[in-house]
């Protein structure tokens, strides 16, 4: 039985699953098969987040992109659980209401869009629309593909939620001023997406991972597991496309930022500066020699 004591999580030995060395565990297989894609997206997100945290308009667009994915997944998940089909019980037992992100993300977006829901309610960018439509069609035909999203999208938040909250809270110029509220209160209003309303986030993560493994281990055929792995790859790829789409959409704004120039064209800027420096010193030497 899982127990918590203050901030310390205690699990019985048999509950700490899957073990990192369990090569048959679906979660471990997904991680292995998507490692290259994960590293690529992680590097991309690290750079883009650093830039977005300097511009609230870009940050809220990024948050909006993820909102549509989570909202669609959770809407489809609810439909499948209520459908009373062969996948309903498995999905219901794996799902934990505390990890739902739709309402949390809405709270943040209402904050950043000044309570104007029309600004974010529907996806308007092509890759976001493609992502949402793909989710709806795929899980309607094969409800077990939701398991790819329950692993990739939600465990990513468990892994990075605390780090993200810390990074965002220190961001300069990201938060709008609100009369009568302290900086700490304002930060809390704008970081709901990365907050889980539980006493012990680590315990929630461990129980979630345990139930995911125990229920998928014999509940899926090998062919279905392979399909879940392929869908997981698609999630990483499409997330990358959505991020790149936002970058293109904001290219004019980004191109004015020195941090963006340094990150994307740093090598060429450095070489240009070196050339200018060489020309300058050569010119000085020539002038000195002549006079």
Image (cartoon, rainbow, N blue to C red):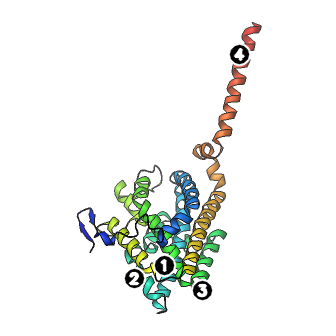
Q: Which mark is residue 93?
A: 2
- Quarter containing the N terminus: bottom left
Whether residue 125 is visible here, answered yes or no, is no
Looking at the image, do the residues carrying marks 3 and 2 touch, with CB atoms under 8 Å apart?
Answer: no
Q: Position of residue 155 (x, y in %)?
A: 45, 67
Residue identifier under label 3: 141
Indicate which label's residue lies in the foreground, 3 or 1: 3
Mark 3 nearby-residue class (10 Å; few <14, some 14–19, many ≥20): few
Indicate which label's residue lies in the foreground, 4 or 2: 2
Quadrant in the rendering for residue 246: bottom right
Which residue is outermost to the top?
291
256 vs 216, left or right, is right
Residue identifier under label 1: 74
Task: Say if 223 sits above or below 38 in the image.
Answer: below
Indicate which label's residue lies in the foreground, 2 or 1: 2
Residue identifier under label 4: 284
Q: Secondary structure at mark 4?
A: helix
136 vs 159, left or right, is right
């Amino acid at each position: 039985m899982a127990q918590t004591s203050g901030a310390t999580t205690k699990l019985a030995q048999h509950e700490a699953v899957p073990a990192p060395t369990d090569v048959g565990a679906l979660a471990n297989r997904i991680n292995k098969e998507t490692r290259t894609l994960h590293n690529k997206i992680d590097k991309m997100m690290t750079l883009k987040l650093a830039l977005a945290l300097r511009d609230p308009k870009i940050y809220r667009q990024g948050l909006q992109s993820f909102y549509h994915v989570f909202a669609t997944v959770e809407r489809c998940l609810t439909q499948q659980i209520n459908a009373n089909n062969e996948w309903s019980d498995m999905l219901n037992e794996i799902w934990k209401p505390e990890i739902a992100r739709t309402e949390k993300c809405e709270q943040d977006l209402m904050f950043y869009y000044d309570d104007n829901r029309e600004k974010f309610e529907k996806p308007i960018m092509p890759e976001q629309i493609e992502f949402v439509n793909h989710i709806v069609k795929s899980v309607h035909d094969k409800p077990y593909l939701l398991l790819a999203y329950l692993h990739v999208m939600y465990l990513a938040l468990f892994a990075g939620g605390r780090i993200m909250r810390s990074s965002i809270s220190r961001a300069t110029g990201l938060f709008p001023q609100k009369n009568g509220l302290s900086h700490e209160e304002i930060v809390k209003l704008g970081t709901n997406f990365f907050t889980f309303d539980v006493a012990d986030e680590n315990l929630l993560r461990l129980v979630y991972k345990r139930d995911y493994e125990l229920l998928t281990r014999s509940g899926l055929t090998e062919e279905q597991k392979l399909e879940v792995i392929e869908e997981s790859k698609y999630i990483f790829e499409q997330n990358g496309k959505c991020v790149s789409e936002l970058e293109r959409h904001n290219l004019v704004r980004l191109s004015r930022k020195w941090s963006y120039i340094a990150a994307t064209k740093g090598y060429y800027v450095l070489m240009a500066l070196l050339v200018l420096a060489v020309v300058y010193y050569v010119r000085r030497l020539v002038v000195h020699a002549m006079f």
